[in-house]
Image: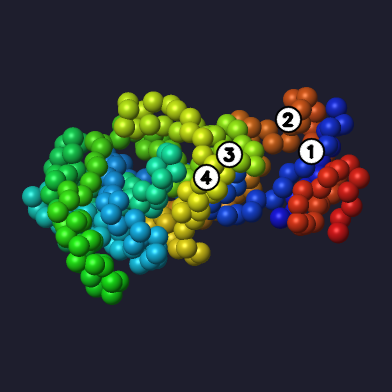
């Protein structure tokens, strides 16, 4: 993707900064976008308690999901929101139009295929009389989890039936007889914790570079969290082909939107609820400077200032010698 070549005015060390590839599956190129996203969410924060709800598909549907990704993922978004929205309009729980930010994930920490959505839900809504109303769980719970699970299962199976996908009767019986998993956390403590927590899910990739401990032509060793055994930190070694097989399962269809806002968090509501928001895309240097990272400081000697030398044109690989390479 090309980049820029700099030199330190103290130690004379050359540094290459490559342009971001912009791919949402890249483990290195999402940090600045994550910070921009956090700023946008801070401007759209509702002063209330927020809840975290997770809707998970049973593993029996994994093969169907991989072969019909767009349809199955879209049905997962739609069914999760319809479930939340239905409970929100029930006067027993809220009786108002609520909202949700829903993020699609397809992986577990060990890279196994595990399609599910994370929902961050404000505990308030707007009634038909245009008044704010707070959920009745007093911050302890949003909606009953067992009831959410039953409704979600029914809505998702109905969505699959309407999609026209050919699902066998034996598979239908299997998933109908299972208890589908819906997980709900109590309300978050404060605004900053909530937004950073959500950003971690919104811009997380299946694996990041720092988790890869060792690799060669034959195998890859990476760290993971074993959630079934008290969140123990462990390492796993896979053959190179198996590692790649697991990784590419989590590459989502091109153009598929994996972060969606519903209800009062949808863009159609923004002008009503957040009328003073101004859209501004700030330079990455300004963003990181405010976070305490001086991007103009030499990372080698920590004293000198980086001076721009030239642009590096896109090529099929990184320059072998950045001191002598010329633009192509």
Foreground label between 2 and 3? 3
Q: CA distance from mark 1 to mark 4?
A: 31 Å
Q: To which residue does mark 2 refer?
A: 299
Q: What residue appears at the point 31 percent right and 32 percent down from the top-left corner? A: 228
Q: What kind of colouring is applied to the model shown?
A: rainbow
Image side of residue 100 versus residue 323, left or right:
left
- Of all residues, the one furthest to the bottom in this rendering is 164
Foreground label between 1 and 4? 4
Which label number is shown at residue 54? none
Q: What residue appears at the point 64 percent right and 32 percent down from the top-left corner? A: 293
Q: To which residue does mark 1 refer?
A: 15
Badge 3 vs badge 4, beta-carbon distance below 8 Å: yes
Instruction: Give whichever of discs 3 and 4 has the lower sequence position.
Output: 3
Q: To which residue does mark 3 refer?
A: 219
Instruction: Give whichever of discs 3 and 1 has the lower sequence position.
Output: 1
Residue 262 visible in the picture: no
In the rendered image, the quadrant that contains the C terminus is bottom right
């Amino acid at each position: 993707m090309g980049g820029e070549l700099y030199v330190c005015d103290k130690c004379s060390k050359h540094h290459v900064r490559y342009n971001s590839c912009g791919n949402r599956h890249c483990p290195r190129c999402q940090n600045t976008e994550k910070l921009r996203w956090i700023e946008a969410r801070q401007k759209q924060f509702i002063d209330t308690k927020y809840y975290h709800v997770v809707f998970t598909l049973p593993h029996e549907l994994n093969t169907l999901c991989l072969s019909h990704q767009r349809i199955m993922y879209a049905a997962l978004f739609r069914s999760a929101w319809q479930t939340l929205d239905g409970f929100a309009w029930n006067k027993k729980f809220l009786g108002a139009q609520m909202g949700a930010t829903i993020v699609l994930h397809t992986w577990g920490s060990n890279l196994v295929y595990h399609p599910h959505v994370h929902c961050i839900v404000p505990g308030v809504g707007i009634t038909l009389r245009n008044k704010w109303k707070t959920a009745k769980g007093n911050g302890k719970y949003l909606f009953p989890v067992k009831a959410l699970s039953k409704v979600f299962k029914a809505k998702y199976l109905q969505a699959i039936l309407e999609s026209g996908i050919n699902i066998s009767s034996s598979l239908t019986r299997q998933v109908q007889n299972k208890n589908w998993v819906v997980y709900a956390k109590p309300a978050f403590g404060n605004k900053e914790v909530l937004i950073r927590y959500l950003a971690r899910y919104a811009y997380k990739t299946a694996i990041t570079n720092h988790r890869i401990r060792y690799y060669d032509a034959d195998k890859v060793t990476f760290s993971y969290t074993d959630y079934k055994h008290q969140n123990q930190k462990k390492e796993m070694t896979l053959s190179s082909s198996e590692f790649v097989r697991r990784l590419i399962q989590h590459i989502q269809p091109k153009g598929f939107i994996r972060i969606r806002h519903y209800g009062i968090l949808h863009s159609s509501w923004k002008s009503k609820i957040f009328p003073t928001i101004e859209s501004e895309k700030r330079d990455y240097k300004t963003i990181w400077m405010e976070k305490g990272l001086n991007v103009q400081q030499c990372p080698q000697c920590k004293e000198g200032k980086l001076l721009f030398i030239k642009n590096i044109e896109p090529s099929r690989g990184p320059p072998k010698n950045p001191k002598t390479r010329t633009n192509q």
